[in-house]
Image (cartoon, helix red, strand yellow):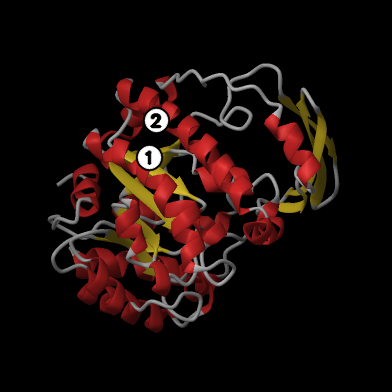
Amino acid sequence: MTSRERLLTAYRCEQPDGLPIMIRGVRCWDEQWVATRHPSYKPVIDVVAEYGDYQLGWGLGSGVLLSGTKEAWYSTETVPGEDWNDVLRTLHTPAGELTARYKSSNRGLPGLEVEHFVKSLDDIECIASIPYEPLQVDASGFFALDEMIGDRGVVMCSIANPLYTFAMLMGSELLAIWSIEQRDMINEWIAILTERSCDILEQEIAAGVGPVFSMLGEEYITPPLHSAADFREFCVEPEKQITRRIHDAGCILHTHCHGPLDGILEDFIDLGSDVLHPVEAPPLGNVTIEDAKRRLAGHICIEGNIQIGDIYAAPTGQIIDQVKHTIDVAAPGGGYVLAPTASPYTEVLTDQTVKNYVAMVETAAEYGR
């Protein structure tokens, strides 16, 4: 099988001819990414280029609240710093301006949110004033990526998660408070954004995009910050409208969700997920690979679950044992892709981290194929 065939076979919970190996965040195909990495990344890039199955992402962009209107827009002002830049974003709406602030790294680190656009119910009035015009889909970028990567992997088309789109306006803290005080308002906005997301999806499917769509952001509403009932109300039920359209088109949904999933694991089956990453084991998660395989087998492909913290710091022998054990448990019967739980997140990789990445990939290739 080619890498593409291997991944798609596993995603459909079938048995590929060898173990798919997807090393998240190591973008071997991206010349600019490779050129801007510290030299410590080279052995990792080389081993992934030799053995890895590539997973690329493409997204249409979300406009302003999934609207293509010209009556609302963003502007940005950046104050440069040595390590961190202060970025002020302004959302201009017919009812007034909203501001948000975050810090962007000059060293390739994740950004840090400082202030969100929505801070009060008055700010919701500004959001509500944004007119809706359907976004126009130009899928040429997707097809260019798909042609470039060829049989070496798959290109996943990102679909806007309604809850996540709304949550990003205010952050997790205010969302948690409003999930108690303003449930009706949250549900109204989720319904609006679900309809808009479906409109975009239908255009993409009509344009021939697929067969893999991706969604993330469910972790904003998972336990322990929210209840399992909240997850079902705010995520599962609305997203089923989206996944139904994906499956009707013969396509696949890839879901990315960190955290402890024991109390909601089967809800991802109900939601319509076909692939679930990263299914974290204890202590960061609370589902062992044995339990996850037993509960998801035949329904959802597990993509994971080699913990990024272990890759960074554990003894190499532990990584080798963990990879072999995970393959023994999760690979039989199909529906498994070996992957780390997250991308490499430091500018420089230590010697130990490099050894562990190389050992993970080489062990997976030798033991799983």
Q: Specify the quadrant of the image occupied by residue 78.
A: top right
- Residue visible at 58% across and 49% down? 37
Local crowd at mark 1 within 10 Å, few (<14), some, or many (≥20)? many
Query: 354 or 148: nearer the eye?
Result: 148
- Residue visible at 62% across and 61% down? 346
Can residue 35 be seen? no
As drawn, is 338 to the left or to the right of 311? left
Given contact means CB atoms under 8 Å apart, are the residues at marks 2 and 1 in contact? yes
Where residue 175 appears, as percent x and y from the top left, is: 66, 55
Position of 121 relative to 176 (above/below) = above
Query: Which amino acid, mark 2?
Result: Leu
Q: Secondary structure at mark 1?
A: helix
Numbered circle sitting on residue 201: 2
Quadrant containing the C terminus is bottom left
- Residue visible at 47% across and 38% down? 194
**Mark 2 / mark 1, whichever is N-terminal:** 2
Q: Specify the quadrant of the image occupied by residue 141.
A: top left
